[in-house]
Image (spheres, rainbow, N blue to C red):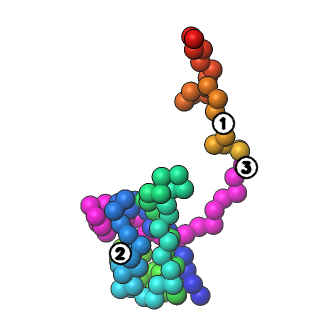
Amino acid sequence: MNTKLFVGNLSFNTTQKQLQDLFAAHGTVIGADLIMDKVSGRPRGFAFVTMESKEAAEAAIQALNGKSIDGRAMTVNEARPREDRPRTGGGGDRGDRGDRGERREYRR
């Protein structure tokens, strides 16, 4: 049975290929998904790696959690299901409210 791992605290320079190769040393990697920011297109500093077996996933966690890659100590653990959160609609037009949501008056 496949096991999905969360890999956090990644350098913005870490590539999907690096992750694939790094985790492949501990078992068969089904997939490595480096999460990218939708707006900037830059990596967000975390990824999900799916290992073919629970045993391979455990071996990768033991070997790689805390290991330094590109000058950053990775966090590796079993991925948990995403918690349901209420949708806020966010990201819409902010008008003239500024960063803290307060209205600002402008002179013309």
* Label 1 with label 3: CB-CB less than 8 Å: no
- Residue at position x 44%, y 57% in the image: 42
Quote the CA–CA distance across marks 3 and 2.
35 Å
- Residue at position x 38%, y 69% in the image: 15
Q: Can you identify the residue that label 2 sits on?
A: 18
Q: Which mark is residue 93?
A: 1
In front of the other: label 3 or label 2? 2
Q: Earlier in the sequence, mark 1 or mark 3?
A: 3
* Range drawn in magenta: 65-87
Query: Between 75 and 104, which is closer to the camera in this rendering?
Result: 104
Q: Is residue 67 visible?
A: yes
Which quarter shows the C terminus? top right
Residue 3 x %, y %: 55, 80
Q: Name the quadrant containing residue 10.
A: bottom left
Q: Secondary structure at mark 1?
A: loop
Above-or-below relation of 82 to 33: above
Quote the CA–CA distance across marks 1 and 3.
19 Å
